């Protein structure tokens, strides 16, 4: 396919010099703004920016010498001119949107650059899926760089994915034009234990001169952490407290502090800068995961920057952490992340640095949004049938598929139960005493123990793994099913009624993936996600409305957790402690081994 490449500095250098020297007219001049300089941490009044061929040629007190009769003029009228915002670590699939629709959702919020790791689609469609994401990303009017996923499966031996990614795939992808580095290295036990495959993937990335993403999801800052740091990751976003942040930057890693839909890790870590006084250049702001509702209603990186400022961070420092720090980290400091000659002309006009209203967005030298309204097209990739037909269940499921058989003659059992923690990725390993009816261990609405099942959906094996989960607060007869099931993306079904669970699973088989909620025998919410069972190519506003309906449906079933859908979709993420479910069984993630659902019977 044809890639819409943005011209490099080398391609347009003669034009940049000619405009800056006054020998040729600029395409665009932004006049009389307050230049927020993220290189020097200054705010300089009454400055102009001259742009040609999508790049900045001149920033200074007067661009009159390079203004011609056909030069477009944007009057800044004393507003702040800040660089376009960069998201240093994120997964487009979490928005339930394709790259084109994600771009359309965030351009009005001032995001002009994203560093994305499509490891969700990699688990479903392998290298082909990554290429499709990469190709649609390159069509967009803003900068979307792709990190080659490193861990599919995320934990070898504990789950089965639709496809696996290996060192040869990584080496091949490093040659693609939009690949910026390696996606988060989630298999941190593998790195710590010297896994040949993980270190080969890291080596392939380092040899290509690209950036290795990290993911150390453990509170242990002792020897395992040091072994992981020696394994080459250049950044990490899994820290949750100040000590985590300090440990990482001391070891030469960039600390990525995230505010997503369910992650609230900025406030607890930014004190390393605001109170401890550490050098902020090694800190980066990111979202990691934002669902469509957050993008439509609350914002994207503008929301993260505002939050950092609310946490006591100097506004210009907060902007540095969402612009120049991010660009420098990925080796792109000469190309983007600041308002300076040679850089892509990604500029936001805002009347206030603290509340950060995004009033005018210029990307690659043209106006792409004004007052939240997107003014450009975001072209779609032609997704093939192979990407749209990925729910392969083999046969319809019945209530019997969701039975947890108790040992012969037992009247009660003690079960291992996954405990959901509000607003956090880790789960708790709980136990519960459950009654047995007709040889089947039963959940208990009174003590908030529901059933959970993982339904295999990649290879039509017919497999169903059953267990128990607590924390959602579901009441009555209900079930919720989702083909978004990080990271292997089988199907997670949670319910209080086995018949409802079968109905919900079969419904997603019929529609090709998504999320559904059943209550008292009826479907009360559906979000169709036809692409890989993960994304929709409908506009963000439509997807957000259906997702909001899903949230209300969960509440109607008794769930009051904040952002409970994210918790639901993470229950199979077998790299984050303590207890998860996979297609192979119940996983004890503190020991990276399988464990029994039924602990004991009486």
Image (tube, rainbow, N blue to C red):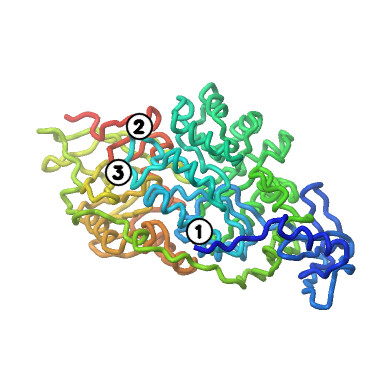
Going by the image, does 380 lie left or right of 163? Answer: right
Q: Earlier in the sequence, mark 3 or mark 2?
A: 3
Ranked by sequence position, the earlier of labels 1 and 3 is 1
Residue that mark 2 sits on? 588
Name the image quarter holding residue 274.
top right
Q: What is the residue that sits farthest to the top in this orientation?
A: 223
Which dot, 1 or 3, sits closer to the camera?
Answer: 1
Residue 577 drawn at (x, y percent): 42, 34
Q: Earlier in the sequence, mark 1 or mark 2?
A: 1
- Please provide percent x and percent y for residue 175: 54, 47
Q: CA distance from mark 3 to mark 2?
A: 19 Å
Q: CA distance from mark 1 to mark 2?
A: 38 Å
Residue located at (44% from left, 63% from top): 548
277 in relation to 537, above or below: above
Q: Which mark is residue 135?
A: 1
Tag 3's secondary structure? strand
> Alpha-carbon neighbours of circle 1 within 10 Å: few (<14), some, or many (≥20)?
many
Question: Residue under circle 3?
Answer: 449
Q: Secondary structure at mark 1?
A: helix
Label 3 or label 2, whichever lies nearer to me, is 2
Q: Which of the pair 460/163 is nearer the observer?
A: 163
CB of mark 1 within 8 Å of CB of mark 3? Answer: no
Q: Which mark is residue 436?
A: none
As drawn, the residue found furthest toward the bottom would be 69
Q: Residue at x 48, y 26 (%)?
A: 192
What residue is at 40 percent from the left and 29 percent from the top? Answer: 590
Residue 323 lies left or right of residue 185; in this view the side is right
Say if residue 214 shows up in the picture: yes
């Amino acid at each position: 396919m044809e890639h819409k490449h943005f011209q490099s500095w080398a391609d347009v250098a003669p034009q940049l010099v000619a405009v800056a020297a006054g020998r040729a007219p600029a395409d665009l001049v932004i006049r009389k703004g307050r230049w927020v300089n993220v290189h020097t941490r200054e705010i300089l009044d009454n400055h102009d920016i001259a742009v040609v061929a999508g790049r900045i040629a001149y920033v200074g007190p007067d661009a009159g010498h390079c203004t011609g009769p056909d030069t477009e003029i944007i009057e800044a009228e004393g507003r702040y001119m800040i660089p376009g915002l960069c998201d240093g670590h994120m997964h487009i699939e979490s928005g339930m949107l394709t790259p084109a629709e994600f771009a359309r959702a965030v351009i009005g919020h001032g995001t002009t650059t994203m560093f994305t790791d499509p490891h969700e689609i990699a688990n479903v469609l392998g290298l082909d899926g990554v290429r499709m994401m990469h190709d649609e990303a390159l069509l967009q009017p803003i900068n979307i760089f792709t990190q080659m996923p490193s861990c599919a499966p995320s934990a070898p031996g504990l789950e089965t994915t639709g496809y696996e990614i290996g060192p040869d795939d990584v080496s091949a992808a490093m040659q693609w034009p939009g690949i910026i580095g390696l996606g988060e290295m989630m298999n941190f036990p593998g790195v710590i234990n010297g896994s040949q495959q993980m270190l080969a993937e890291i080596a392939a990335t380092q040899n290509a001169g690209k950036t290795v993403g990290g993911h150390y999801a453990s509170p242990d800052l002792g020897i395992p952490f040091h072994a992981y740091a020696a394994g080459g990751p250049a950044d990490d976003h899994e820290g949750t407290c100040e000590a985590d942040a300090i440990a990482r930057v001391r070891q030469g890693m960039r600390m990525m502090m995230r505010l997503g839909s369910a992650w609230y890790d900025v406030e607890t870590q930014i004190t390393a800068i605001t109170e401890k006084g550490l050098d902020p250049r090694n800190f980066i702001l990111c979202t990691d995961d934002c669902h469509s509702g957050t993008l439509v209603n609350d914002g994207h990186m503008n929301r993260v920057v505002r939050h950092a400022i609310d946490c006591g961070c100097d506004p210009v420092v907060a902007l540095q952490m969402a612009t120049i720090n991010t660009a420098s980290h990925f080796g792109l400091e000469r190309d983007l992340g600041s308002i300076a000659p040679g850089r892509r002309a990604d500029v936001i006009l805002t009347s206030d640095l603290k509340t950060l209203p995004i009033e005018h967005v210029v990307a690659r030298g043209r106006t792409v949004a004004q007052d939240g309204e997107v003014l450009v097209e975001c072209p779609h990739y032609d997704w093939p049938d192979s990407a749209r037909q990925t729910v392969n269940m083999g046969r319809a499921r019945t209530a019997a598929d969701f039975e947890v058989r108790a040992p012969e003659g037992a009247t009660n059992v003690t079960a291992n139960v996954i405990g959901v923690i509000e607003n956090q990725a880790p789960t708790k390993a709980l136990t519960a005493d459950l009654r047995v009816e007709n040889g089947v261990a039963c959940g208990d609405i009174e003590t908030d123990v529901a059933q959970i099942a993982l339904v295999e959906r990649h290879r039509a094996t017919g497999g169903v793994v059953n267990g128990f989960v607590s924390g959602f607060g579901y009441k009555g007869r209900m079930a919720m099913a989702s083909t978004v099931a990080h990271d292997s993306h089988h199907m997670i079904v949670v319910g209080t009624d086995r018949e409802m669970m079968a109905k919900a699973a079969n419904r997603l088989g019929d529609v090709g993936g998504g999320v559904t909620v059943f209550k008292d025998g009826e479907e009360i919410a559906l979000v169709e996600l036809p692409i890989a069972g993960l994304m929709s190519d409908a506009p963000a506003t439509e997807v957000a409305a259906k997702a909001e309906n899903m949230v209300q449906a969960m509440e109607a079933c008794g769930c009051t957790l904040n952002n409970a859908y994210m918790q639901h979709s993470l229950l199979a993420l077998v790299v984050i402690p303590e207890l998860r479910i996979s297609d192979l069984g119940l996983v004890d993630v503190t020991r990276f081994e399988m464990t029994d659902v039924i602990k004991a019977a009486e």
